[in-house]
């Protein structure tokens, strides 16, 4: 089953050009790795000094073989540690839903990362997919997907067996990447009343982070 590996790196302010060059180098070194299907790079906007690397793999086995030498988190730490404000975060996820409108060129994007408590995970997944399917019938979205998985560090953090660690291990994380052809389309998407209702429910049963991005081809 196809696997998505998402890596989020926060960089120091004032080093944008150098940081972008280093991140691009990391992405370029991965392009010919066996089993990797594609790589997407996004940079933070609206004050976000970060980079978001999304790599898709044919299956988990290819990723496990490649990650020792070609894990973007480790490559960033080894090549750009002085530009990072913290160790990059990483998630391993399975695709649940996707959408692309070939006639629209994405220029702005947002990543919604939500960690949901175990008893609400399945309900949130169904409601999220239904919400996206409904809005995909409108012309606002250019490209989007929804994935579900866990933080790559969760398993190791849960080894001590504490109740809080076990709770974190059981929680699923959703990543919803949304992109639009312009800020007007983005505003129209977020203004949808049914979507606002879903977001309200999501924040009752989980914790959501929103990262404003722009694609870097």
Image (tube, rainbow, N blue to C red):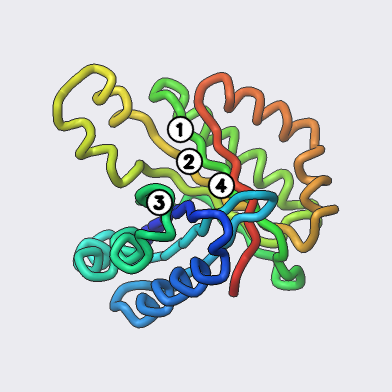
Q: Residue at x 16, y 23 (%)?
A: 161
Query: Sequence-wise, which precedes: disc 3 or disc 4?
Result: 3
Callout 4 secondary element: strand
Q: Is residue 37 above or below residue 169?
A: below
Residue marked by disc 3: 94
Nearest the eye: 91 or 26 = 26
Q: Quadrant of the C terminus?
A: bottom right
Q: CA distance from mark 3 to mark 4?
A: 12 Å
Q: Position of residue 179 (x, y in %)?
A: 67, 57
- What crowding class fits label 4: few (fewer than 14 Cα within 10 Å), some (14-19), or many (20 or more)? many
- What crowding class fits label 3: few (fewer than 14 Cα within 10 Å), some (14-19), or many (20 or more)? many
Residue 176 is tagged as 4
Callout 3 secondary element: strand
Q: Are marks 2 and 1 in contact (CB under 8 Å)?
A: yes
Residue marked by disc 1: 115
Query: Sequence-wise, which precedes: disc 3 or disc 1?
Result: 3
Residue marked by disc 2: 174
Q: Residue at x 76, y 41 (%)?
A: 190
Q: Left of 158 or right of it: where is 167? A: right
Q: CA distance from mark 2 to mark 1?
A: 6 Å
Q: Residue at x 38, y 57 (%)?
A: 5
Q: Quadrant of the N terminus?
A: bottom left
Q: Are marks 1 and 4 in contact (CB under 8 Å)?
A: no
């Amino acid at each position: 089953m196809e696997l998505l590996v998402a890596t989020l790196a926060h960089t120091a302010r004032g080093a944008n050009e150098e940081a972008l060059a280093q991140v691009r180098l990391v992405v370029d070194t991965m392009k010919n790795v066996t089993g990797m299907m594609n790589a997407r790079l996004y940079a933070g906007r609206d004050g976000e000094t970060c980079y978001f690397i999304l790599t898709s793999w044919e299956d988990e086995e290819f990723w496990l073989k490649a990650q020792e030498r070609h894990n973007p988190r480790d490559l960033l730490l080894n090549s750009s540690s002085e530009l990072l404000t913290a160790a990059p975060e990483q998630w391993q996820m399975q695709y649940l839903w996707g959408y692309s409108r070939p006639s629209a060129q994405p220029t702005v994007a947002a990543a919604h990362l939500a960690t949901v408590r175990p008893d609400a995970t399945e309900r949130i997944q169904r409601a999220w997919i239904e919400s996206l399917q409904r809005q995909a019938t409108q012309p606002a979205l250019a490209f989007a997907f929804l994935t579900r998985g866990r933080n790559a560090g969760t398993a190791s953090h849960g080894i001590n067996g504490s109740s809080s660690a076990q709770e974190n291990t059981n929680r699923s994380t959703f990543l919803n990447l949304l992109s639009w052809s312009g800020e007007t389309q983005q505003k129209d998407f977020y203004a949808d009343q049914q979507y606002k209702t879903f977001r309200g429910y999501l924040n009752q049963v989980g914790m959501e982070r929103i990262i404003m991005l722009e694609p870097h081809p």
